[in-house]
Amino acid sequence: MSGVNIQGLSIKFGTNEVIKGLDLQVHEGEFLVLLGPSGCGKSTLLHSIAGLIDVSGGSIHIGGQDMTEAEPSERGVGMVFQSYALYPTMTVEKNMSFGPRVAGVPKAEIARRVEKAANMLQLSALLQRKPAQLSGGQRQRVAIGRALVREAGVFLFDEPLSNLDAKLRAELRRELKLLHQTLGNTMIYVTHDQVEAMTLASRIVVMKGGVIQQIGTPAEVYETPANLFVAGFLGAPAINLVPATVGADGVSLDGALPLRLSAGRAKPGQPLVLGVRPEHLRLLSDGRWRATVELVEPMGNHQVVWMKRGEQVLSVIVHDGRRLAAGDELGFDLDEAALNVFDAASEQRL
Amino acid sequence: MATRTATALWARIGVYAFLLCAAAFFLLPLYVMLTTSFKTMDEIRLGQIFALPSSISFEAWRAAWSEACTGVSCEGVRGGFWNSVAITVPSVVLPILLGAINGYALSWWKPKGGEWLFGVLMLGAFIPIQVMIYPLVKLEAAIGIYSSLPGIVVVHIVFAMPIMTLLFRNYYAGLPGELFKAARVDGGGFWRIFVQLVLPMSTPMLIVAAIMQITGVWNDYILGLTFAGRENLPMTVQLNNVINTTTGERLYNLNMAATILTSAVPLLVYLISGRWFVRGIAAGAVK
């Protein structure tokens, strides 16, 4: 088992710098999720850890050894791809044993590893099948098995569940988490799906434009986002963003939700953005503000209520079964302790 | 509805009528060749070109294969047949193998300057071969393989390189790139990935390339005449010598038989590979 230490990493495609001086410490045995929109450099970062992309600056240490220039197979990593990337002419067994066969591992040892991985992933009955004869979920299990059989210290996952339907995705997500609990290996997982990130990660790294925006546990990243981008990227429905201006006294905030905020970090006249998670708004008949219901989305165990106050649209999560209809006027209030305050100009948390 | 089915029926009849005409147009020469080859010279002299032979005689076929005269020797086209086989086998296997390696290297390993090299290679495909014949003769003479079996094989390899490289490069570029990455993480090197992963996936393209190369090399005349040397003249050159013999009677039945014998190999390749070809394409389509 091994950690990964990345320092000052930069990667260029031609003149386009995709990763800019990135530092990242992946602890031994943790499940690190790289999260961001497409084109944010998260896959590039993962591929550079695997050695599939040449870096133009900085260093990558895996298990304490400098692997910046090492061949992919020498790095002690196993990798799972979005398209599964199974070798189509080989059986499941041959797919899984390809790596160890190349490395010259003794036959008995290969057989033991394949059997172990197959048992773990419920593939024992499928070992002699070709990839074309498998379902999508089975194929991805084989791809995971192929990484397991390498008995690598670090597992790399490149959006492994994106090609599966929603039900299978949830199922395999649970299996992956169980697998990590059983094996305890270091895992680095790339996704653009915040649910996968929240459910799987020990820590989440949120990226944008090749730069790390925030690193933290799922709770930290969700509850105290470092900037407006992180706040907006995590959470469904998205966080409510309310523009506000600091009043002359430095504590009263004007805007759609006028309130007094005791925090003295903001200067009078400074434009701010308030971030309120939908679950932190409460419908109260004697609340400080009133709004009109625009739309109700029933979700079974809760409902999302979209309301309008002037021009400001707000979403609220309601857990009781009360019946609401478009046009209803409601009072509401918010939990100030859970409020996120950002500077409107720098978009950074205050 | 009734008029609609009637229209469809007439359209169908029109299509079939056209197809039958086209088929007849292409099959008529073959029909004439086959019937003539089974006739005796006496029957041919009657001038009824479309008539069926009164009795089937294989005499012309036997003579064409083992007795027809080309210049001074009278050994039929069989010598040319085996010469063509000796030329075609290496001239099919080697270009396909080299083309596959080229295409694999260009599309998967992307070496520095590879795109430039490929551009130059493609440019070479547009230069008429006549331009290159004389320089190639001098070159082969200088290294001592002119007028020999290796001499003609090398020329076929050179002229096949652009199209073979193009075929395989495009085919491999269409395969998922993550396969290559997975194989690299698994420790595969250049040759292992090629032999164990890429080549087994290439069946449809190997068949296409083989059809192109077999028919191209077998039907070649000018390169064989120029580079193979007297001992290795391909069947096409011998056929020409048989038919253009200026002395004596023109043996139409023998000439027809010799021509069919010469074109038998490409014909068989098409007939046999057709279904393999379709099967290969279909197997590639269903992932």
Image (tube, coloured by chain):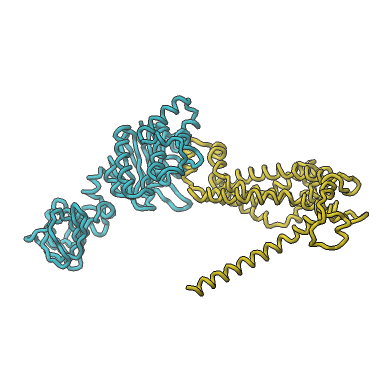
Residue in the picture at 40% in, 41% down: A80
Looking at this view, name the residue that lies furthest to the front: B54
Residue in the picture at 33% in, 46% down: A169
In the rendered image, the vertical position of residue B73 relative to residue B6, given as above or below: above
Residue A279 visible: yes
Which percent across, then down, holds residue B257? 80, 52
Looking at this view, name the residue that lies furthest to the bottom: B3
In-image side of A213 versus B139 (left or right): left
User: Which image quadrant is residue A66 in?
Assistant: top left
Residue placed most toward the observer, A261 or B127: B127
Which chain is yellow in the rendering?
Answer: B
Looking at this view, name the residue that lies furthest to the right: B248
In-image side of A131 versus A7 (left or right): right
Looking at this view, name the residue that lies furthest to the left: A286
In-image side of B109 versus A92 (left or right): right
Which percent across, then down, holds residue A284? 9, 58
Residue placed most toward the observer, B203 or A241: B203
In-image side of B14 versus A154 (left or right): right
Q: Colour of chain A?
A: cyan
Residue placed most toward the observer, A150 or B74: B74
Which percent across, then down, holds residue A346? 27, 56
Residue in the picture at 65% in, 51% down: B162
Which percent across, then down, holds residue B32? 78, 59
